[in-house]
Image (cartoon, rainbow, N blue to C red):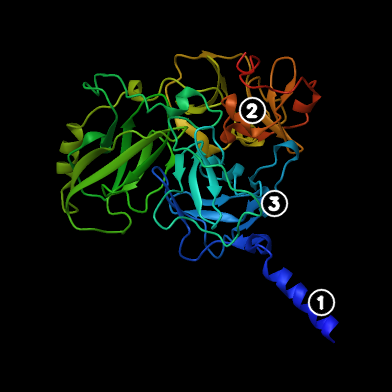
Amino acid sequence: MKKHFLITLIILLNLSFIPAALASASGAIDSTNRYAWSENAGWIDFGTTQGAVQVTDSAVTGYAWGENIGWISLNCSNDNSCINNLNYGVANDGKGNLSGYAWSENVGWIDFAPSNGGVIISSSGVFSGYAWGENIGWINFNVNNPVTTSWQPTGGSPTPTPAPTSSGGGLPPVAFTPPQAPSPTSANPTGGFQVFINSGASLTNSAQVSLSFIVGSDIARMAISNTADFTGIGQETYEGIKNWNLCSPSYSCSAGSKTVYVKFYTSFGQPSAVVSATINYDPNASAQAVSNAQNSAVSLSPAVLPTAFNSNDLVLDHSTIYLIEGQQKLGFTNMKAFKGLGYKLKYVIPGDTSAYTLSDVVLSSPTQAHPVGSWIISKKTVYYVTSTGLIPVPSWNVFLNNIGSSKYIVKANAADLLQPLLSNMINSDSRVGE
């Protein structure tokens, strides 16, 4: 009996000294301490019940929720969307050093280990550091009541992360440049970003108005609000003309002066200063009074539309959608070809393409090969189309380094796959853009 008692006591003593971290192979997010902050996207919640974020010794899974950008998938295993050599997910080295990418349908890739930032989990389960979003910039975990998990490192300590200086990992210098302000024109004598309500009219008798803008060539997204603090407002794809309700989020509002506020963003999430426009809303104003106000409004010519674009941009110009490739534009002849080749209307922007040469290549069939310069995906692998074949992309870091953007990827078809395979893409690959 004494022998059995001693063995039991020894076992109990040994168990009592097992480190707590070893008992925390996985952990959930604290119900109170659960938020990170993005200057361009607002609060991001890692602790929603629906998101079910879990931290393990090797990964972070589940979904975070952005108040202005929607769901962020932290791992492709969430919905079985993992794709061969381009699997994505936030990885954990067991010491609390996070790496890899999360994915948002609305704002693209989020890097948890950029070269000038990074996110770690401390020995007490507290997140700190900075992640980088390709379209929203820095996400700051160094906030009051930061994201906290019941998971703890199994051995060693994470490497402290520095505050970001100017750039995220593997991204070009343009990623950290503020939007280029428009040059002066006859419609915009002082230059700079502008928003017009009903082309600059001073009076409207309808809360439903049309917004138009003067922006630079590098604008990809925008945020519009009826309040200066942009409460509850997220980013959306830039459109040259936007229908808007002066009373939003209500359906009606009192008469009086109404102001609309707008911020513009580059494709890398760099914001412009806030611009605004004001109009007098009087639902009892006569049609003649509104017409007189409209006649005195600013006349916006096509010259104020964007005139410079990136390769693979989709531009609507005089009722035709063009695909931009270098200094050429390729026109779609019908919507069947546009949609059949995998392109999406939400990425189309209005613009003036007169400076681009019309290509001999016409996009007329949903079964034709995608043109040179396209990013395509087949059997869960991404390729870049060249005149001599397809270049496989080995990783998202290489993809982003070569100025790839998730919105440009379209599904490959049989005609694409008849082309020969070339060597893997490398950083700053000279074959991109040839």
Look at mark 3 in the image and give the residue it sits on.
77
Measure how far apart labels 3 and 1 are at the Cα level: 44 Å
Q: Earlier in the sequence, mark 2 or mark 3?
A: 3
Q: Residue 385 sits in which quadrant?
A: top right
Decide: is 324 above or below 406: above
Measure how far apart labels 2 and 1 are at the Cα level: 57 Å
Left or right, 209 with reference to 116? left
* Residue 341 visible at all: no
Q: Are marks 2 and 3 in contact (CB under 8 Å)?
A: no
Task: Identify the amino acid type marked 1.
Answer: Ile
Task: Identify the amino acid type marked 2.
Answer: Val
Q: Earlier in the sequence, mark 2 or mark 1?
A: 1
Look at mark 2 in the image and give the residue it sits on.
398
Q: Secondary structure at mark 3?
A: helix
Look at mark 1 in the image and give the residue it sits on.
7
Q: Secondary structure at mark 2?
A: helix
Q: Callout 1 environment at 10 Å: few (<14), some (14 to 19), or many (20+)?
A: few
Q: How many marks?
A: 3
